[in-house]
Amino acid sequence: MPTVALLDGIKIEIFFRDHVPPHIHATSAEHEVLIVIEDGSIYEGSLPRKQLRIAVEYVQNNRTKLLDIWEKYNQK
């Protein structure tokens, strides 16, 4: 599971052979949220409000790059 980015204490990761929809895992301390890459929606979990805003903004601003990485590590 490569770490794609570190943002103000938030680790952004994409897991190998993960389930659809394409998503990232954003973790901070004991919190974790899965964010759908295509639309920035929350799939599961939670982060504190400020960290969630940072993570969602990162996904929205890096959608193409994140989808490319997700597809690379999740090919069938």
Image (spheres, rainbow, N blue to C red):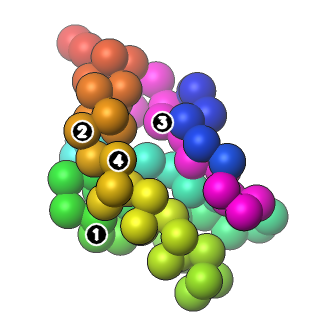
Tell me which residue sits at (28%, 69%) in the image: 41
Task: Determine the image quadrant of residue 72.
Answer: top left
Image check: 56 left or right of 12?
Answer: left
Tell me the residue at 28%/47% (across/down).
63
Of labels 1 and 2, earlier in sequence is: 1
Contact, mark 3 vs mark 4 (Cβ under 8 Å): no
Relative horizontal placement of residue 4, taking residue 39 as reference (left or right): right
Q: Which residue is mark 4?
A: 62
Of the numbered discs 1 and 4, the one sitting upstream in the chain is 1
- Residue sitting at 20 percent across and 62 percent down? 39
Question: Disc 2 marks which residue?
Answer: 64
Q: Amino acid at mark 4?
A: Asn
What is the distance, in whole Å, between disc 1 and disc 4 at their CAs?
14 Å
Work out which residue is located at the far right of the displayed protein and give it. 29
Residue pointed to by mark 1: 41
Quick check: can you spot residue 23?
A: no
Q: Mark 3: which amino acid?
A: Ile
Describe the element under mark 3 as helix, strand or loop: loop
* Residue at the limit of the structure toward the bottom, as seen here: 49
Q: Position of residue 73 (x, y in %)?
A: 38, 19
Q: Secondary structure at mark 2?
A: helix
Looking at this view, is 16 or 68 the one in front? 68
Whether pointer 3 and pointer 1 mark residues with C-beta atoms closer than 8 Å, the reply is: no
Would residue 22 be seen by someone viewing this image from the given angle? yes
Q: Secondary structure at mark 1?
A: loop
Using the numbered discs, state the Cα–Cα distance from disc 2 to disc 3 in whole angstroms: 14 Å
Dot 1 amino acid type:
Ser
Q: Which residue is mark 3?
A: 14
Magenta stretch? Answer: 7-19
x, y percent for residue 34: 44, 58
Q: Is disc 3 surrounded by few (<14), some (14 to 19) or many (20+) residues within 10 Å?
A: many
Mark-to-mark CA distance, 1 and 2: 16 Å
